[in-house]
Amino acid sequence: MDSGFAQTLLLTFQLAAVTTVLLLFIGVPLAFLLSRTQSRFKPILEALISMPLVLPPTVLGFYLLLAFSPRSALGNWLVETANIRLVFSFAGLVIGSLIYSLPFMVQPIQSGFESLPKHLREASYSLGKSVWQTLLRVELPNIKPAVLTGIVLAFAHTVGEFGVILMIGGNIPGETRVASIAIYDEVEALNYGMANRYALVLVLFAFTILALVYTINRRMLRTA
Amino acid sequence: MIQTSLRKALHAATGPMTLDIQLDILTGEFLAITGASGSGKTTLLRLLAGLEKPEEGRILVDGAVWLDSARGIQLPIQERKVGLVFQEYALFPNMTVRENLEYGLGKGQSKAIIDELIGITELEQLLGRYPSKLSGGQQQRVALARALVRRPKLLLLDEPLSALDSRMRERLQNYILQAHQAFSLTTLLVSHDHREIFKLADRVISLKHGKISQPDLPETVQYANVSDGTFRLSGEVLQLEEAGSGFSVSVLVGTNVLRVPATMEDLRRLQPGDRVEVLVDAQHAMLIKT
């Protein structure tokens, strides 16, 4: 029982960590492009990224389930060529979480980029520095609080994910059974004590991480 | 020698207009650009720097092509040797003063230039500080020094001192002049301050609706126009008022307000905001040291 508890929590945080790291590499360039583009397709791209904010997670989960299913073209192709099965697997959960938490990473970082005065990057360019050098040495260091907010929100949101995982992950211990699913499962089995242990961990986690973010952001604002 | 010919459609607050400028600047010249806001001054600097693209134009700097729209040549800002100083300073908040300066170093460039610039702009005491801990004047000194690290050919100053008080402004003007001479720069300064222009510039042009008006005929030079026995001071009418038994008109000349005796007729044809010339008899001019 206790090893199952630890295993579930470990899996929950593993999923969140993997998702967050991947999202950082996807979210920063995406936020950068969105903050810079003049394209008339920008609102469409922004709408697509933000869809998980308003869609019921079950809708997203439902379509992912269809797409990942070995009976679908994509699912079939993945199984045939790479032997990757996304339904009811950890890899599938990661992909679902990437989509589900993407706006939480992109939006704070995008508004961070947009809040930087454009003179900063123009000064950097005039000093002979490329767009890439300017991004790494001037822009990102000056929006650290926004990046940190993106990281924490994406991580926390992935920990709190339920609907998508229920649809495409199911409840396989050690593979797809995360804390939020476990709580639901324990309550279904009228196992309130166990549900409470999971719930309490999540409450404490959420409070600690948010308090940490606000503290760090306050300190950064004071030194800036 | 810098030869430019630029055309660009702009959307100013007053409606659409076309920036259309032919301008030759001598190497080593200090050129001031003045004109009402929205007349295209900043855009001209940005076009020279490569921060904006003209519809049509050419920029030749000592024979090198920076821009030639006919041949599709558009050198990116990184490859134009320009130093930029903005009104907003634009120092990197995440770097100390020294780091801001060193950021400007090119690959393999010696750090000797940094020490030289620190000397000229007297930044010795501030090197370890972050920009947020500096006054406006100190920040602008750092920005000026940073703009010179790459040894630019062209220094572009966009109203660099307009956010500073007049005492600080005068000190900064000296730094700018020193840098201009020490590095044999060609400098373009956008400014509204006639005293500043008079002190710094070899030549001044005025922009109006995107065009150069009265080319090479600086308003400041008119201060010294005594060929007909008068000084011609150009200025702006601020106020019309009754003064004792007569009338007077307050005119802003540079940063001084002159109260000029006026007739009833003057009051009828003038209104605040009008541009006027004040003619002063030069015969009785006196100089008093202050």
Image (spheres, coloured by chain):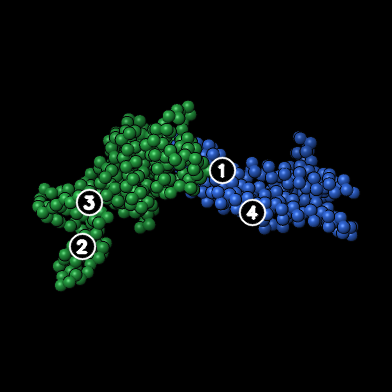
Chain colours: A blue, B green
Q: Residue at x 17, y 57 (%)?
A: B278
Q: Chain of mark 4?
A: A
Work out whether residue B126 or residue B141 is closer to the camera in this orientation and state it. Answer: B126
Q: Chain of mark 1?
A: A
Disc 2 element: strand
| Discs 1 and 2 carry the same chain letter | no
Choose top left, top right, bottom left or bottom right for residue A52. bottom right
**Which mark, residue B259?**
2
Image quadrant holding the N terminus of chain B, namely: top left
Q: Which residue is mark 4?
A: A214
Q: Nearer the viewer, mark 1 or mark 2?
A: 2
Work out whether residue A206 or residue A136 is closer to the camera in this orientation and state it. Answer: A206
Image coordinates for residue B262, horizontal then vertical, percent: 16, 66
Q: Horizontal placement of A140 versus A95: left or right?
A: left
Q: Which residue is mark 3?
A: B290
Q: Horizontal placement of B84 versus B201: left or right?
A: right
Residue extending farthest to the bottom is: B245
Q: Residue at x 33, y 34 (%)?
A: B182
Q: CA distance from mark 4 to mark 3?
A: 57 Å
Q: Horizontal placement of A93 versus B111: left or right?
A: right
Question: Amino acid under label 3?
Answer: Thr
Q: CA distance from mark 3 to mark 2?
A: 21 Å
Q: Earlier in the sequence, mark 4 or mark 1?
A: 1
Q: Horizontal placement of A72 versus A145: left or right?
A: right
Disc 1 element: helix
Q: Are the residues at dot 1 and dot 2 in contact (C-beta closer than 8 Å)? A: no
Q: Chain of mark 3?
A: B
Disc 4 element: helix
